[in-house]
């Protein structure tokens, strides 16, 4: 086997990371757009508190976030018990829990990128659409959303990249179970604890760097391309 040939365990961790990150972004994107729009366009009591709560995962240790998720969604947690009894859904120690942890940690980056994009939209265009008889929803979907798409793209890809690298909250909330919750960072950590696992850990490290760089480049490229198309 060549130096860069991945083992079945490493391939499994890579596939699981992509699966978990994809679901984390897909589930959090609508909520991220809504939260960003509320922060950018609305004035309401407690707005600063909501803003702080959304960005709290950026300043909290990931282990703290993972522990809070464990308290809420664990087998004895209020939300965890309710989901299990009402829908038969178990979050803890599953890939769903890993996706939830990744989504929570990446959510602030998603909201921040989308919010900046919304704030750059000319409000005069929205006002003009309203004077022509368009309702709030039609204004959003026909004027605001098309103009903020670059931010949505950038935020989605940044959230995906952040999800790929999530470690602390994931291992605290759903542990490190091979084939179920062992994502790429967790597999890399495991290999660093095994004698002779240095080269395998280096392979996963290189893959993580390549995926992260690819996500950043893709985010910039797609955002610029869409912006150029809108200007054209």
Image (tube, rainbow, N blue to C red):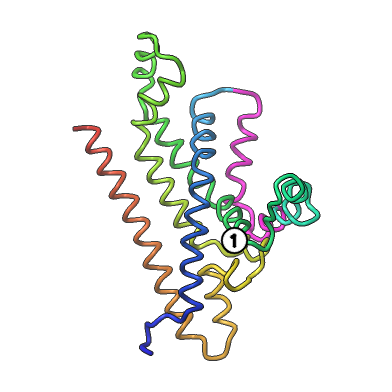
82 left or right of 136 in image? right
Residue shown at the point (42%, 31%) measured from the top left? 118
172 left or right of 158 in image? right
In this rendering, is residue 7 above or below 221? below
In this rendering, is residue 204 above or below 2? above
User: Which secondary structure is most common in the magenta stretch?
Assistant: helix
The C terminus, quarter of image = top left
Residue bearing mark 1: 95
The part of the chain drawn in magenta is: 44-68
Residue shown at the point (71%, 51%) measured from the top left? 88
Q: Is residue 167 one of those drawn in magenta?
A: no
The N terminus, quarter of image = bottom left
In this rendering, is residue 105 above or below 203? above
**Residue 59 image position (x, y, % from top left):** 60, 52
Q: Label 1's element?
A: helix
Which of the 4 image quarters holds residue 64?
A: bottom right
**Residue 57 image position (x, y, % from top left):** 60, 50
- Front residue (pair 1, 58): 1
Classed neighbour count for the residue bearing mark 1: other residues with Cα under 10 Å, few (<14), some (14–19), many (≥20)? many
In this rendering, is residue 228 above or below 121? below
Residue shown at the point (50%, 41%) measured from the top left? 111
Q: Residue furthest left?
A: 232
């Amino acid at each position: 086997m060549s130096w860069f040939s991945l083992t079945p365990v490493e391939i499994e961790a890579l596939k699981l990371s992509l699966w978990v990150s994809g679901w984390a972004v897909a589930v959090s994107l609508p909520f991220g757009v809504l939260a960003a729009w509320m922060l950018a366009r609305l004035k309401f009591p407690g707005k600063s508190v909501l803003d702080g709560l959304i960005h709290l995962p950026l300043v909290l240790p990931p282990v703290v976030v993972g522990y809070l998720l464990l308290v809420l969604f664990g087998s004895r947690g209020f939300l965890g018990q309710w989901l299990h009894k009402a829908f038969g859904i178990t979050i803890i120690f599953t890939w769903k829990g890993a996706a939830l942890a990744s989504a929570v940690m990446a959510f602030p980056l998603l909201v921040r990128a989308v919010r900046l994009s919304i704030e750059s939209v000319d409000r005069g265009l929205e006002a003009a659409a309203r004077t022509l008889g368009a309702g709030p929803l039609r204004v959003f979907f026909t004027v605001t959303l098309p103009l903020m798409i670059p931010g949505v793209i950038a935020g989605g890809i940044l959230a995906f990249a952040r999800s790929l690298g999530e470690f602390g909250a994931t291992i605290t909330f759903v542990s490190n179970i091979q084939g179920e919750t062992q994502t790429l960072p967790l597999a890399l950590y495991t290999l660093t604890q095994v004698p002779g696992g240095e080269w395998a850990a280096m392979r996963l490290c290189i893959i993580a760097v390549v995926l992260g760089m690819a996500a950043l480049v893709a985010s910039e490229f797609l955002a610029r391309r869409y912006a150029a198309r809108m200007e054209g």
